[in-house]
Image (cartoon, rainbow, N blue to C red):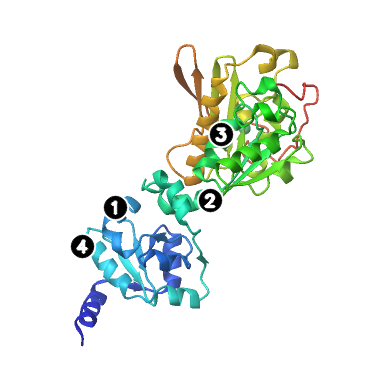
Amino acid sequence: MKGHERLVAEVRVRIPELSPRETLSLQARGAALIDVRELDEIAQGTALGALPLGRGFLELRIEEAVPDLTRAIVALCDSGVRSLLAADSLVRLGYTSVYSVAGGFARWKAEGLPVEVPVAIDAVARERYSRQLQMPEIGGAGQTKLTRSKVLLIGAGGLGSPAALYLAAAGVGTLGVVDNDVVERSNLQRQILHTDARVGTSKVVSARLTLEALNPAVKVIGHETRLTSTNVDEILAGYDVVLDGSDNFPTRYLVNDACVKLGLPNVHGAVMRFEGQVSVFWPARPRGGGPCYRCLFPEPPAPEDAPSCADVGVLGVLPGVIGLLQASETIKLLLGLGEPLVGRMLCFEALQGSFTELTFQRDPGCRYCGEGCPFPGYIDYERFCARTAR
Ligand SMILES: [Zn+2]
């Protein structure tokens, strides 16, 4: 027996092996599946949900990927030999529950178990996103998630502009933009997607020009229409997160109600004069759903009590601050990082330079997100002025 064969035989005594099917069920119960092949092998395809760690950096990266030494880890390679040796290293690092997939990815594929082909991060993308890729919380796996993500921006105005720019810059793969307006010169003080030369042009067209110039890899889908009860389901379908930058109550309530119905997180922002607020409304959040907009404000105010930015003005920087907080919340949601502003509203007051956080609970009697209540249908609050400045 050759040296390496003897080593593998010794390790096989210490490391329990699982079939691909046993691995799948352990993975469903919370085990981490790690692919220890070289990254160019992983790029051809891997088991669904496997962490692409690569044998070369395994010992350096595993503690960030799996900080809990008691969590079960299953190592996967091509045929089940390298994964045994990798698993042995993990035991030496202190992991207490380590397995290896017998037969490796070859057997996994042969048994028809779910696979995925990671989005290739080419040289241009590697350079573009290098500051994100170097953070272990994001890395290649996170960047791939962003590339596959779809975010719908309600409005290409004061809030949507900064949010869209940074989401495109970060590499969110698909950005939908809903807007029915044309660029006006009075928009340019804060709606930084647009330019003076584009006054009179559709905001959706202008947004696409700016975003594609910033990052040609991003797909921009224009929805050049006003959101109504008849088109909202169709427009929101297929997106992962909705970023509400609308400036009027009819749209804000419609977006809330549709997000409740479709189970989507609604990243809310609003601004006026020197103040702004941001929150995440997400009753359907797995493990810890929060309130919806109607839990706070069950019905819109009377139109005469609802001044718009067109009536009272807004400091141009304000939607920049709030729109970027919305972008930050959106990226956290897409990556599953940190603690989203669910059940919390962050309020910014520019003159004092202060942030205040309000917490609020879900209303069990909420007509839209209350427990077990059937969806009551959409309401078009037509009494309101449909178009105000953002
Ligand atoms: Zn609610």
Tell me residue 311's x, y (percent): 69, 13
Q: Secondary structure at mark 2?
A: helix
Residue at the far bottom: name it. Answer: 1
Q: Quadrant of the C terminus?
A: top right
Q: CA distance from mark 2 to mark 3?
A: 16 Å
Residue hosting label 1: 63
Tell me residue 328's x, y (percent): 49, 35
Is 350 above or below relative to 175? above
Mark 1 or mark 3, earlier in chain: 1
Dot 3 amino acid type: Ala
For residue 13, what is the image quadrant? bottom left
Q: Is mark 4 within 8 Å of ligand 1?
A: no
Residue at position x 54%, y 45% from top? 172
Mark in front: 4 vs 3: 3
Residue hosting label 3: 163
Dot 1 amino acid type: Glu
Residue at position x 77%, y 26% from top? 381
